[in-house]
């Protein structure tokens, strides 16, 4: 069960990053998704915690159901 969760973190992060990039390029924050710029060691990229949690949960469900 926990292995599926750890495996789902990468697809959840990729999902959040890709959708956030599309929303930021459109000039919106996504409303309740609250897309914002996250800066890590002077590298800024768009990110949304709500998309990350949703994408990770979806990937976790898919990976867990495959076992």
Image: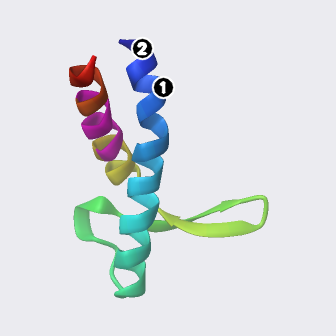
Q: For residue 56, what is the image quadrant?
A: top left
| Residue lying farthest to the top in this orientation | 1
Q: For residue 23, what is the image quadrant?
A: bottom left
In this rendered view, identify the residue nearer to me: 37 or 14: 14
In what element is the residue under mark 1? helix
Q: Which circle marks residue 2 in the picture?
A: 2
Residue where numbered disc 1 is placed: 6
In this rendered view, identify the residue nearer to me: 47 or 31: 47
Callout 2: few (<14), some (14-19), or many (20+) C-alpha neighbours within 10 Å?
few
Q: Which residues are magenta?
A: 55-61
- Display colour scheme: rainbow
- Who's the residue at 45% across and 17% down the image? 3
Q: Is residue 57 magenta?
A: yes
- Who's the residue at 49% across and 42% down the image? 10
> Which percent across, then down, holds residue 18?
42, 66
Prevalent SS, magenta region: helix
Quarter of the picture containing the N terminus is top left
User: Spatial distance from mark 2 to mark 1, Cα to Cα?
Assistant: 6 Å
């Amino acid at each position: 069960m926990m292995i599926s969760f750890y495996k789902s973190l990468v697809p959840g992060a990729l999902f959040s990053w890709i959708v956030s990039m599309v929303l930021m390029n459109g000039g919106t924050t996504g409303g309740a998704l609250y897309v914002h710029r996250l800066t890590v060691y002077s590298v800024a990229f768009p990110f949304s915690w709500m998309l990350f949690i949703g994408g990770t949960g979806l990937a976790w469900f898919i990976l867990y159901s495959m076992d």
